[in-house]
Structures are given as C-alpha cells and as structure tokens.
Amino acid sequence: MQGRVVRTSHQSQCLSDNPLGDPCERDLYVYLPPQYDGTRRFPVVMMLAGFGATNHSIASWSPWQPNTIELTDQLIADGRCKPAILVLPDCFNRWGGSQFVDSDGTGRYQTYLADEVFSFVDAEFQTIPKREGRAVVGRSSGGFGALRLGMDRPDVVSVIGSHAGDAAFEVSMRPMLTSAAIAIDLAGGLRAFAEDIPAVGPKNATQFDAIFVLAASAAYSPDPTSFPFAQIPMDPATGELRSDVWARWLRHDPLERIEASTAALETMSLIYVDAGNRDEHGLHFAARMLDEALRKRGLPVHYEEYEGGHRGTSWRYEVSLPQIVEALQGPA
C-alpha cells in the first residue's frame, strides 16, 4: 500500500448505556491516502459493514484479492480516484448488527456515527470538517445505514452510496419472516433463541434469517421493557404476520421515507444506488424502486444494475468510490 491505515479506538458517550450491554469503546480504522502529509485536508468517506460483519471484516486480509482498503489505495495510487480518507466504524452488537439507527432496543448508533465518529476523526486527522466533504457508503445493511444517515442527518453528509441496501421491505424482508419463525419456534420461542444464538451463531439459513429478524426488530420495533428488547413482526408458532409490528418496520423502510425526506435528499450532491440483477433477497427490485422514486422527485440519483447476486460484491467499490469522491469537496 502507498497510503497507510491507522487503527485507533473511540470511547462513545451515547453508547455507554446501551440496553444490550455491548462495548462502548469501539475500534476505528482510518485509511490515509498517499497524499496525506498533515498539511492538506481531505474529504472523508465513512464505510458501513453489512449485517453479520464489522469494520474488521472490511479490513480483513486475503491472499487472493485486495480488501476494500487496499482496493481504494490502488484506485488512488493509479489516479482512478481522487484522494480521500476512509473511516471504518464498528457498529456491531449482540444480534449481529445495529442497522445503524437509534433504538431503545440496541442503542443510539446513528447518533454515534453522526455526532461522535465524525467529530473524533475531524479532531484527530486533516479532514474537511463539514458535510460537503463527507460521504457515507455501505453494502446491504450498511447501504441501509447510509441511506438512513443521509435522510435523517443531512447536516453531516452530502453524498450517499448504497450497494444493495435494505429497502422495499414488503419485497425484500417480508419473505424471510416465515423462515425466521421456523428457527425461533424450534428454539423454543424468541427468548430462548435470543439467549442461545449470540454464543453459537447461526448454523443454517433459517437461523441466519432469524437472527437478522431479531436484530432488525430490535432496531425497528424495539421493546425496551424486557429482554430481548424487541417485538418480532410474526407469530413464531404460526408464522402469521403481526400487522401492528410490521407497520413499525415499514416506518423505517427507506423507500417509504423518501417522501418525508425529500428536502434532506435535495441537499445531496449524489445518491449512488446499485444492486446485482439476481440478488437473493430481491434487493435489486428494491434498488429499482428507489431509483424510480428518487428520479421522480428530481433527486440526484445515479443507478447501476450489474450481473451478480448479493454476496461477494465488495468489488463494486471500484466503480462507486471514484464517483462518490468526485462528488465531494476536494482536498484543501
């Protein structure tokens, strides 16, 4: 690598009282481009991991292909991407992912990103410390987190990148509820499942769907009164939809939030959206609907659909990052 990676940590105030008892001191990876010499300021791209992964996953070494940090370094060194600082925060929790939103069931993860991580990085490194110099990107649940951060906190970012981000829940999320109900029922109910799954992890597809539904429920339909601090949107004994809980989920759907978030999204200089054309969760359908809804409102969306599925798509950053950094205020 021609740039360098700094691994540091941050003591969060807003996560200190999270109901799951997850750590409030979090590791943070910061990539500094080759041009970084302490005298110039650079834009910042915050990168959010997908469900079941964290910043360590993005930074993991492989003998066969570059990780995302190494890929970014290659792009910048080759002149295919303008220089930028990458920030990789940790928002993992007991259920495998916080969905990067504030919740009474998990903690204030969106506030952690918007108010603590950006401020910490601005204080420690030569960033462009304003929204015009900041982007947020992610894949899968990380793409959802990026969409929501741009919609909810346009004061901190001006560019959004969503690679197969969770959206259009009726199409992409609802089908997994039956599979999740099977695993939760076999475990003896939600509490029993929640007590066992963090220690052993999901062993099959139905258990993976179940822990995702638990994590998403803790984020979208929390119940702060009792463990596991979540209401799930189906009855695990019958698989039937609980319409009142599902309605709470839908209020978090980026597709459903576009109308109310139009003013925020109008301040973005770019909204990058893509997905593979055979995404196993139907998130290419969600991406198409997002593109249509954003375009209809005259919002600055760039949409791409490529040959592929949901997994193994970190290579898409080679396509998106040059466009995302180009849309930011450049080095000063």
Image (spheres, grey):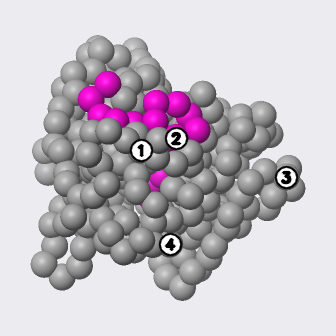
Residue 64 at what x, y percent from top left? 18, 82
Is residue 307 shown to the viewer in this render? Answer: yes
- The residue nearer to you, when weighing 98 against 147, is 147
Rounded to the nearest angstrom, the CA distance separating label 3 from label 4 is: 23 Å
> Which of the two labelled residues, at mark 3 and mark 4, occupies the earlier sequence position?
3
Q: Is residue 313 left or right of residue 94?
A: right
Tag 1: Cα neighbours inside 10 Å, few (<14), some, or many (≥20)? many
Tell which residue pokes out farthest to the front in this image: 39
Residue position for label 4: 319
Rounded to the nearest angstrom, the CA distance separating label 2 from label 1 is: 8 Å
- The residue nearer to you, when weighing 325 against 234, is 325
What amino acid is at disc 4?
A: Val
- Look at the numbered disc 3 and give the secondary structure of its residue: loop
> Which of the two labelled residues, at mark 3 and mark 1, occupies the earlier sequence position?
1
Residue position for label 2: 133
Q: Which mark is residue 298?
A: 3
Identify which residue is drawn at 30% across, 65% down: 73
Rounded to the nearest angstrom, the CA distance separating label 2 from label 3 is: 23 Å
Residue position for label 1: 42
> Which of the two labelled residues, at mark 2 and mark 3, occupies the earlier sequence position?
2
Give the residues in magenta: 123-143
Tag 3: Cα neighbours inside 10 Å, few (<14), some, or many (≥20)? few
Tell which residue pokes out farthest to the bottom in this image: 307
Is residue 99 shown to the viewer in this render? Answer: no
- Look at the numbered disc 4 and give the secondary structure of its residue: helix
- Which of pointers 2 and 3 indicates the residue nearer the eye? 2
- Which of pointers 4 and 1 indicates the residue nearer the eye? 1
What amino acid is at disc 2?
A: Gly
Count every numbered label the image shows and give the total.
4
Q: Is residue 126 left or right of residue 290?
A: left
- Which of pointers 2 and 1 indicates the residue nearer the eye? 1
Q: Are marks 2 and 1 in contact (CB under 8 Å)?
A: yes
